[in-house]
Image (tube, rainbow, N blue to C red):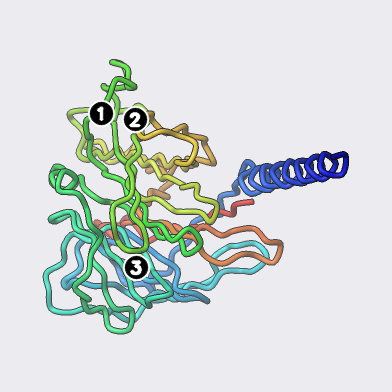
């Protein structure tokens, strides 16, 4: 009997130790992240003017990029060189487009699935997320099973974002426009905010879950503005199940002077929340670009993806902006990296 009791106690202690180890491992995997924002750069001689709205890493120095105003449906191939010590972009060029003679679907988000050698692109026209072959940009006929209710977003306010993580094997996107929240978990005050939905799909392209996401209140909004946009521009899925969300607010007054873009990178963990409770947001970093006096670094960042890791193990986040075809010869096709530790 004593041996049985001792064996039971030993098994219990081992199980407790294993459970504690799992908790510690999870805590280590999901410890707080820090970020450093590198200076933005552009390469007008080697990167053609574009309306670049999404980016995904293909490995090495190769990236696939989409434009929301390209002449055909498909994606561009970019070569982006990143310093392995600092994460700063040293050079970039693009000279290839892969696609076919379908009209552009207002392509906004893009994600690479390495195990299938395919690309997924979200288009705001029809709010569909279609699959394409990597080698030639042709459609495969497959797509994510987006619920019908999420295809009814207002024009130009649909699926701006898309990300796929090969570790979790999950796709993520978010509606850029406001959607009503279900249940009683949302207060009357929150209902006045931008109630978005973070959507998850599995590797079989099936819809898995949705999570309410509350946008920040705008810093400045004027009915007389020449241009204004606020919403989630992109998402980036991490290996540990968390998601980085890019909230972007753009303001352009009539005289252009005083224009700005506020970019905030938040980290959310869908595994911690229920389906009816808004996700808890933790600010990772933020930055602002402006047209002010002689200073002009205005950049409307719409795309981001995980890139390589640096020599010290830090993760590179690569970002790309939409210059509206280098509008008025004032805007530039900026690229930027954020180093995450």
Label 3 and label 1: CA atoms lie apart by: 35 Å
Q: Which residue is mark 2?
A: 276
**Mark 2 or mark 1, which is nearer the start of the sequence?**
1
Q: Residue at x 32, y 22 (%)?
A: 186
Where disc 2 sits, the SS reads: loop
Measuring from the top left, give residue 305's x and y in whole percent. 45, 59
- Please give left or right for residue 307 compared with residue 31 in the image: left
| Left-right relation of 198 to 125 | right
Spot the residue most to the top. 188
Q: Are marks 1 and 2 in contact (CB under 8 Å)?
A: yes
Answer with the quarter of the image where residue 116 lies: bottom left
According to the picture, the residue beneath numbered tag 1 turns out to be: 182
Q: Quadrant of the N terminus?
A: top right
Task: Please provide percent x and percent y for residue 300.
Answer: 35, 50
Does 260 sit above or below residue 340? Answer: above
Image quarter of residue 32: top right
Q: Quadrant of residue 205?
A: bottom left
- The one of 187 and 267 positioned closer to us in this rendering: 187
Q: Earlier in the sequence, mark 2 or mark 3?
A: 3
* Marks 3 and 1, the one that precedes in the sequence: 3
Q: CA distance from mark 2 to mark 3?
A: 34 Å
Expressed as whole percent of the image width and height from the top left, the position of residue 138 reads 22, 79
Query: Where residue 233 is drawn, which disc sits there?
Result: none
State yes or no: discs 3 and 1 in contact (Cβ < 8 Å): no
Circle number at residue 65: 3
Q: Is disc 3 surrounded by few (<14), some (14 to 19) or many (20+) residues within 10 Å?
A: many
Q: Is residue 37 left or right of residue 105?
A: right
For the point 34% across and 68% down, the residue is: 65
Give the percent coordinates (x, y) of residue 46. Answer: 39, 76
Foreground mark, 2 or 3, reads 2
Report if residue 335 is visible in the image. Answer: no
């Amino acid at each position: 009997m004593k041996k049985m009791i001792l064996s039971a106690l030993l098994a219990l202690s081992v199980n407790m130790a294993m459970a504690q180890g799992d908790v510690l491992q999870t805590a280590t995997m999901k410890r707080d992240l820090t970020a450093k924002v590198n200076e933005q750069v552009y390469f007008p001689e080697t990167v053609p003017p574009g309306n670049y709205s999404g980016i995904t890493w293909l490995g090495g120095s190769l990236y696939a990029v989409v434009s929301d105003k390209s002449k055909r449906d498909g994606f561009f191939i970019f070569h982006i060189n990143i310093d392995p010590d600092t994460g700063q972009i040293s050079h970039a060029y693009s000279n290839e487009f892969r696609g076919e003679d379908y009209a552009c679907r207002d392509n906004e988000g893009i994600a690479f699935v390495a195990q299938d050698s395919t690309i997924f692109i979200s288009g705001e026209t029809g709010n569909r997320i279609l699959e394409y072959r990597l080698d030639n940009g042709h459609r495969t006929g497959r797509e994510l099973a987006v619920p019908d209710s999420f295809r009814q977003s207002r024009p130009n306010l649909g699926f701006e974002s898309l990300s796929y993580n090969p570790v979790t094997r999950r796709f993520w996107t978010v509606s850029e426009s406001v959607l009503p929240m279900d249940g009683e978990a949302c207060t009357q005050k929150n209902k006045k905010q931008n109630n978005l939905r973070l959507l998850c799909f599995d590797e079989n392209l099936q819809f898995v879950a949705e999570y309410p996401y509350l946008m920040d209140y705008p810093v400045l909004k004027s009915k007389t503005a020449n241009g204004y946009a606020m919403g989630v521009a992109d998402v980036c899925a991490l290996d540990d199940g968390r998601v980085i969300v890019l909230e972007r607010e753009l303001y352009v007054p009539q005289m252009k002077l005083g224009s700005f873009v506020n970019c905030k990178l938040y980290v959310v963990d869908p595994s911690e929340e229920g389906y009816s409770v808004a996700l808890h947001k933790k600010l990772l970093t933020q930055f602002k670009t402006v047209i002010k006096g002689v200073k002009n670094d205005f950049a409307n960042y719409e795309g981001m993806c995980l890139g390589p890791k640096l020599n010290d193990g830090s993760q590179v986040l690569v970002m790309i902006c939409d210059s509206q075809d280098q509008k008025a010869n004032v805007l530039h096709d900026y690229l930027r990296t954020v180093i995450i530790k």
